[in-house]
Image (cartoon, grey):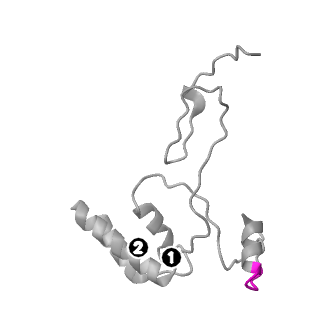
Amino acid sequence: MLARIASDWGALGITVEVARPGKPADLKLVDAVAPSTSPAWFLRSFRCGGVAICDPEADELLDGARSASVAEQRNALLAQAAQRMDDQQLFIALAAPIRWSLVSSRVQGFAVNRFANHTLTALQQRPDRER
């Protein structure tokens, strides 16, 4: 991915290189799988105090969403916080979210899931009778 970003952004005159551990960076590449379907997990990634660039008003909306007792109100506040973050460009999508697994075709019962949890311990592999 780094090579692709360096190539694409290099055409714009932007140099892309890996920051050394513990050193500051202008951008951070995050590869994480959401542990739930709630947008709150993603939005909390941009809270003030945790990142250098943030929106205090979005933080207030997130606080309101956390204390909301009605789901519709919570969802509305999360949507408002997301819109503020989009307007401020706190997040730049570099690629579409992708998850994949390399699983032998001999493994029976494997199923992709939205959280990228692939616990193969519950699956049993049948002996390959074609050998």
Residue at 72% x, 63% y is 1
Residue 31 coordinates in the image, percent (x, y): 61, 60
Amino acid type at image mark 1: Gly
Dot label at residue 67: none
Q: Is residue 43 above or below residue 88?
A: above
Amino acid type at image mark 2: Ala
Q: Is residue 23 visible?
A: no
Residue at 65% x, 25% y is 106
Q: Which residue is mark 1?
A: 49
- Residue 16 falls in which quadrant of the image? bottom right
The crowd level at tag 1 (other Cα within 10 Å; few <14, some 14-19, many 20+) is: few
- What is the chief secondary structure element of the magenta stretch? loop
Q: Is 13 in the magenta?
A: yes
Q: Nearer the viewer, residue 7 or 29?
A: 7
Q: Which residue is mark 2?
A: 82
Q: Which residues are magenta?
A: 10-15
Residue 56 coordinates in the image, percent (x, y): 42, 82
Q: Is residue 34 visible?
A: yes
Q: Nearer the viewer, residue 28 or 67?
A: 28
- Residue 38 falls in which quadrant of the image? bottom left
Residue 69 appears left or right of 114: left
The answer for how far apart the CA atoms under marks 1 and 2 are is: 18 Å
